Image (cartoon, rainbow, N blue to C red):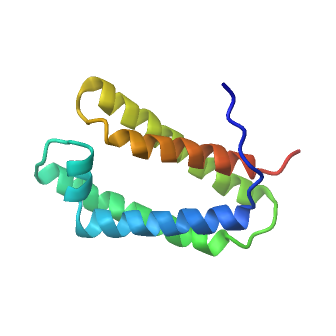
């Protein structure tokens, strides 16, 4: 089956992704236990440390996407779209690997689906050459 992405403007997508990233940053920084519970991970000191570090990365991504949202087509915007898509695809792949290895529960599938949709959406905004 082929997924056809609707024609979405980069500005709209970058803004929505920046809001999502800001929410994820806040949750990872303030309450990493939410993801430990949702994904049925083994709690421990390491999950909190890694969660806080993920929160910092998501905060940076939120700011980057918000600031670049008004950019016109070009190499720089394509680089951001491609990089974000690669990151989302890798997050989805590691989520599936965690699920299939038994390290995470089925709650991680929500994240995997959102990550795959974001990857496809950002790739669809790349300039056609």
Judged from this view, the residue extending furthest toward the right is 129
Q: Position of residue 103 (x, y in %)?
A: 23, 32
Q: Position of residue 91 (x, y in %)?
A: 44, 42
- Side (left or right) of 15 relative to 92: right
The relative height of residue 54 versus residue 59 in the rendered view (above or below) is above
Is 116 or 58 nearer to us in this picture?
A: 116
Residue at image x 27%, y 24%?
101
The relative height of residue 33 versus residue 110 in the rendered view (above or below) is below
The relative height of residue 37 versus residue 28 in the rendered view (above or below) is above
- Please tell me in which quadrant of the rendered image residue 52 appears: bottom left
Q: Position of residue 34 (x, y in %)?
A: 24, 57
Q: Position of residue 110 (x, y in %)?
A: 41, 44
Residue at image x 58%, y 65%?
16
Is 20 or 79 nearer to us in this picture?
A: 20
Residue at image x 27%, y 53%?
35
How many labels, in total?
A: 0
- Side (left or right) of 27 relative to 61: left
Residue at image x 45%, y 33%?
93
- Please tell me in which quadrant of the rendered image residue 1 appears: top right
Is 73 or 103 nearer to us in this picture?
A: 103
- Side (left or right) of 31 relative to 120: left
Q: Quadrant of the C terminus?
A: top right
């Amino acid at each position: 089956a082929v997924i056809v992405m609707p024609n979405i403007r980069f500005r709209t997508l970058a803004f929505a992704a920046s809001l999502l990233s800001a929410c994820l940053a806040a949750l990872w920084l303030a309450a990493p236990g939410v993801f430990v519970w949702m994904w049925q991970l083994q709690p421990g000191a390491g999950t909190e440390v890694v969660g806080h570090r993920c929160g910092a990365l998501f905060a940076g991504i939120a700011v980057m996407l918000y600031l670049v949202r008004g950019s016109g087509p070009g190499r720089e915007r394509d680089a951001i779209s491609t990089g974000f898509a690669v990151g989302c695809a890798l997050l989805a792949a590691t989520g599936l690997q965690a699920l299939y290895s038994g390290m995470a529960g089925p709650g991680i599938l929500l994240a995997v689906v959102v990550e795959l949709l974001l990857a496809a959406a950002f790739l669809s905004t790349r300039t056609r050459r």
